[in-house]
Image (cartoon, rainbow, N blue to C red):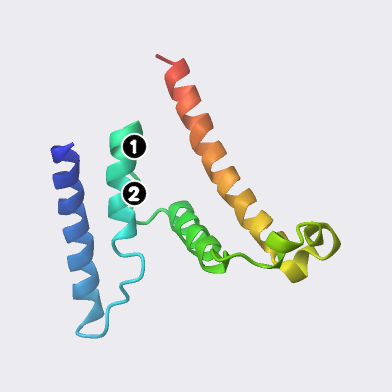
Amino acid sequence: MEGAVKDELIDFMYEFNQKVESSKGNIIYMKHMFTLPVLNVLWNMIGGVRFSYDDKKLHHLIATVEELSRTFDIGGNILMALPFLRYIAPKATGHAHHMKLYAELHHFFRVIDNFFLTLFMQI
C-alpha cells in the first residue's frame, strides 16, 4: 500500500509540475487536482488498476459525482414530503436530472465491473 501511495505521489508531482510549467506564471486551476490521485490509490488497493491523468471517462465520472452531490439537498426537498411528485413532475422536482446522473454512474461502474469479470475469467 505504501508503494502505491509513493508511486501515485511521484506521478502526481510530475503532472503538477507539467501544469506549473505550462501555466507560465498564470493562475493554475486546482479543481479536482487531488481527486484523481486519491481515486488512483483507492482503485489500486481495491482492484490493482490505475487511471491515467488524461482519462476523459474518469474526469466525466468525477464531474458527475460532483454534480450529483451539488444538486442533492441533504436537508430534504419536496420529494421527501411528497414522493409521488417524482412521477407527476420529474423535471420540476429534479428527479429526472438525478436519475440521469445515476444512470451515468451505473454505466461507468458496469463497464468497470465487466472489465474485472473478463479479467478474472481469464485466470
Q: Which mark is residue 49?
A: 1
Residue drawn at 51 percent across, 62 percent down: 69
Residue drawn at 21 percent across, 65 percent down: 16
Q: If the image is split into quadrants, where does the C terminus sit?
A: top left
Residue kind at label 2, given as amino acid type? Leu
Side (left or right) of 59 relative to 47? right
Residue kind at label 1, given as amino acid type? Val
Q: Residue furthest front?
A: 81
The image position of residue 21, as x and y in percent, is: 19, 74
Foreground: disc 2 or disc 1: 2
The image position of residue 31, as x and y in percent, is: 35, 70
Q: Total number of numbered labels?
A: 2
Residue drawn at 54 percent across, 63 percent down: 74
- Foreground pick, 31 / 70: 70
Residue drawn at 21 percent across, 82 percent down: 24
Side (left or right) of 82 relative to 80? right
- Foreground pick, 12 / 24: 12
Q: Residue furthest top?
A: 123
Q: Residue furthest bottom?
A: 26
Within-10-Å neighbours for mark 1: few <14, some 14–19, many 20+:
few
Per the model, the C-alpha gap separating discs 2 and 1 is 10 Å
Side (left or right) of 6 relative to 88? left
Against 101, is 121 above or below? above
Q: Earlier in the sequence, mark 2 or mark 1?
A: 2
Q: Residue furthest right?
A: 88
Q: Which mark is residue 24?
A: none
Against 27, is 75 above or below? above
Against 60, is 41 above or below? above
The image position of residue 76, as x and y in percent, is: 61, 64
The residue that mark 2 highlights is 39
Circle 1 SS class: loop
